[in-house]
Image (cartoon, rainbow, N blue to C red):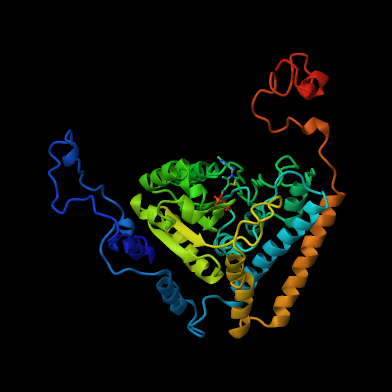
Amino acid sequence: MSSPSAFSSLTTITCKPNHNIPSIIPSKPISTSFLGSTPKLRFSPLSTPSSTRISCLPILAVSDVVKQNQSKTSTIRPNLLITKEEGLEIYEDMVLGRSFEDMCAQMYYRGKMFGFVHLYNGQEAVSTGFIKLLKKADSVVSTYRDHVHSLSKGVPARAVMSELFGKTTGCCNGQGGSMHMFSKEHNVIGGFAFIGEGIPVATGAAFSSKYRKEVLKQTDFEDVTLAFFGDGTANNGQFFECLNMAALWNLPIVFVVENNLWAIGMSHLRATSDPQIWKKGPAFGMPGVHVDGMDVLKVREVAKEAIGRARRGEGPTLVECETYRFRGHSLADPDELRDPAEKAHYAARDPITALKKYMIENKIASEAELRAIEKKIDEVVEDSVEFADASSHPPRSQLLKNVFADPKGFGIGPDGKYRCEDPKFTEGTAHV
Ligand SMILES: Cc1ncc(C[n+]2csc(CCOP(=O)(O)OP(=O)(O)O)c2C)c(N)n1
Ligand SMILES: [Mg+2]
């Protein structure tokens, strides 16, 4: 039997009556004898694992989960959520994410990178809070905002920076660029540029973990997949289809919505009928949790529960992390739409500054120890730039490597030459 999860009671959040929305469910149960009649179209509920069964228990907030785990963490210092070792690891990962992205901005404006580059500044607590709890065999699926997810999962800074520079030493040999980080070795199975595109891929990865365990009997436990995506993406159909499949097949996946309140220049509150994304979990029969995504310790506690549920075979969880991006949508965005007061509000809640304060105030680490980490990371990031700069560009012969569609008739003409070499092609008059 699996151990009971703190989320078993979090699912009951759906029971909170919403007096603004009229109930469409009749108070008396309707007979299920005649399914052809719409008013009588009521089915008996499918049996669900006890952890996802919806009952009317008292509402449990994330803060209660945190408190509950706080008392379990250490008997010597019962108020702390992390050990020194964990704290230093988390701090280092968040500083790496931030410094790496700041360096990307510099390199982009110096013309070292091409195409769109989307930075993750401000959202570090989500990547670190979740990914640092994973094992190597677990998978991460990201979006175009994918550098930091890759770094948290262990892809070396050199490989990510080189990929951004379009060099052969990049994790995709320079063929992916900023939006397409991938590392088979680290089970980063893609940054995806089309929004929502990664969610079915993540669902497929989770299905394959379950299949390997249950059908092929290859492992004793299920590897977990984390699917990261944004608030705007959560209005996309693929999200709903995958919630359905993941719940139906009880897949070992966590859907992590990074709700930074904006989808390019569209406010989440203007674009979404019910802005509380976490509520969509219980609608599909899985727990839905909302957590402060600027607080890495809270994110981490929620992540522990969600990843633990997935690993124990208790199925998927939807976690909405309320966060904020400190820069424009991409480095090409002048970021003029968002209210300066809103930006200032979230800047004051910088997750790295908050963690630093927590660690120093609670004597988990000294200022000198944290400064030493910052210095070490500066060197790692500097080194990644020097490495990327010194690496070579891919040879022309690499152009069609990893292209799985038959290049004949697409990139290559009937004469065996690249179509782009035909001067008429570039004039726009070639017969394609
Ligand atoms: C299928 C598809 N439609 C439209 C776009 C253009 N687009 C790029 S980013 C974006 C907004 C996504 O916002 P959100 O999911 O909140 O992620 P964030 O950028 O805030 O991390 C859109 C619509 C796209 N990339 N893919
Ligand atoms: Mg967003």
Q: Tell me where residue 237 appears, x and y as whole percent.
A: 45, 41
Where's residue 343, x and y in %? Answer: 61, 65
Task: State the image quarter where residue 89 is shown.
Answer: bottom right
Q: Nearer the viewer, residue 181 or 82?
A: 181
401 sits left or right of 249 in the view: right
Residue depicted at 73% across the width and 39% down the height: 175
Residue found 15% across the figure and 41% down from its top: 32
> Is 310 on the left-hand or right-hand side of 149?
left
In the visual, does 208 lie left or right of 153? left
Dividing the picture into quadrants, the one containing residue 421 is: top right
Foreground residue, 297 or 193?
193
On the image, the x and y values in percent for residue 268 come to: 50, 54
* Residue nearest the viewer, comparing 270 with 140: 270
- Report the number of discs: 0
Image quarter in which the C terminus is found? top right
In this view, the residue farthest toward the right is: 390
Is residue 285 at least partly visible in the picture?
no
Q: Quadrant of the N terminus?
A: bottom left
Q: Picture coordinates of residue 184 (x, y %)?
A: 64, 45
User: Is residue 297 something that shows in the picture?
Assistant: yes
415 over 195 or under it: above or below = above
